Amino acid sequence: MADLKKPIMLLVVDLALIVEKLVLIVVVVMASLVIAMYATFAERKVAAILQDRRGPNRAGPFGLLQPLADGLKLFFKEEIIPTFSSKFLFIMGPALAMLTAVMTSAVIPWGDKVQFFGRDISLQIADINIGILYVFGVVSLGVYGIMIGSWASNNKFSLIGGLRAASQIISYELAMGISLIALLMVTGSLSLKEMVLQQQAGYWNIVYQPLGFLIFLICAFAECNRTPFDLPEAENELIGGYHTEYSSMKLGFFLFAEYINMFINSVIMATLFFGGYDCPFVNEANFSPNIAALIGVAALMIKVVCFLFFFMWVRWTIPRFRYDQLMHLGWRILIPLALFNMLATGGVILYFNK
Amino acid sequence: MSITTLAFILLSVMAIGSAVMMIISKSPVHSVLWLIVVFFAISGHYVLLNAQFLAIVNIIVYAGAIMVLFLFVVMLMNLNAETEPIKNYRLQLIGIVSGGSLLLVLLSALMRAGQQQLVEMKVGDAGLINVLGKTLFTNYVLPFEISSVLFLSAMIGAVVIGKKD
């Protein structure tokens, strides 16, 4: 029960815990930003390899400083706010997109605990008992940044992009939610930490929920607006989609939020279905806590890098859907499939638990 | 003043303030955005009552899905402050009278309610997911099943409408 009241307890605890959590928050947010930054670099390199080119190789050794150069370029560009747009909402759009992208990282268990100065520090910012629902809620808020930004631009192409994003995310959220319900029936817990502990003790959830994982993966692509679902920013029909009117770092934030979302979605998929920070065939109890935590974080990051590569691989391989195909896939294929998965999971659990 | 009281006052001011802003703002899109802020404040109240499941479901369902649809429709119809018809005096008067009488009814009901059990902060587990689930599937199983059949029929209806073309 002590675990259940944590969000409220956080308000009245000692200073050391607050400092500890603040440091953890800064580290996690900075790490997500840096990884997202290098994801942009990796995307260009992967694209180059798939298209038989060399990719960016001028800035620094192997072009490693390219993301910094890109960021500087965006910062120094002239900022333009259209005359007829709602100025406050125009600025709110990219800010909200960034905020919701980073917020999810609060409930992810990045590793087990480390020991510093004689204290056990859990590598999770908040182990709330509704972890996965929190993730789902924040993801469903992610569309507001795009919608508000596109409406405030006062541009038809932007508006169409924003509306496409909204209907796409709402449609795919349903299938995603139902596939999650099947997973929750297997684990019996909403806490992400608890799920990882279960997977450490037994098999990874991908063994029990292969179909659920496939549905979740497709929906994650749609929620991130990644190809083949990048219709909101389809550049050959909508100029630039929802960010047509944006320039300078506001455009940068929109683009950057997509990469953070990709990273966070990869972490979520690794945590839910691939054991999180669990390193297979290694018994963490044999090592000292700090080494074990290091192995855990490394294992999680390796899984995440695989997912990020998969995101990029698909982007440069598969062409974009038409909009009716997108809706057909979402409503007529994924949702019935997810419902079937839920029923089958329930039936199997009932059969074996009798 | 404890931090819980402070949070309660902050959330209440936020909820009431944004509700007022929702009513008085001219642009429909701004109204919808203020309504979303109201939902967030109410979710904060749920967290103070230790009903975290209700809080997050409120955000997922209302702020995350229903308000997106509201915003979608408002944006699609392109309602702007300039295109709004100017309401005449009589209509405003009727609005004030009917709203005022509703307020009176609510206030009198509240005054006559007498000393009720006050809401307890930070304690109780009625809003936690396992307790809620057990209650729903034991005490309230029939209403729960009926409402799920209702949702199912709404889903089938949507599929039928979508199939027509």
Image: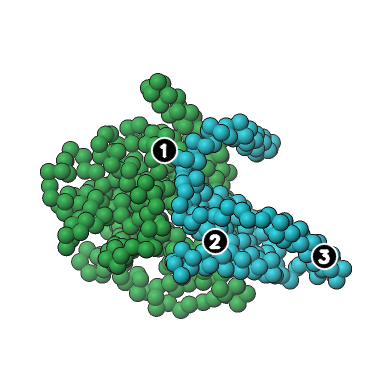
Chain colours: A green, B cyan
Give the residue at x 20% y 51%. Answer: A293
Instruction: Answer left or right for A189 relative to B88.
Output: left
Residue A192 image offset from top left, x and y in percent: 35, 46
Which mark, by number, is residue B41? 2
Q: Which-is-in-front pick, marks 1 and 2? A: 2
A199 w.r.t. A90: above or below: above
Dot 1 amino acid type: Leu
Which residue is under mark 1?
Answer: A184
Disc 2 with disc 3 on a shared chain = yes
Q: Which of the labelled discs sits on residue B97, or is there none?
A: 3
The image quarter in which residue A271 lies: top left
Report if the CB atoms under discs 1 and 2 are less than 8 Å apart. Answer: no
Residue at image point 76% right, 62% down:
B104
Q: Secondary structure at mark 1?
A: helix
Q: Quadrant of the C terminus of chain B?
A: top right
Q: CA distance from mark 1 to mark 2?
A: 28 Å
CA gap, disc 2 and disc 3: 29 Å
Question: Which residue appears at 69% of the width and 70% of the height?
Answer: B24
Q: Secondary structure at mark 3?
A: helix
Q: What is the x, y in percent for residue B128?
A: 46, 45
Label 1 packing within 10 angstroms: few (<14), some (14-19), many (20+): some
Q: CA distance from mark 3 to mark 1?
A: 51 Å
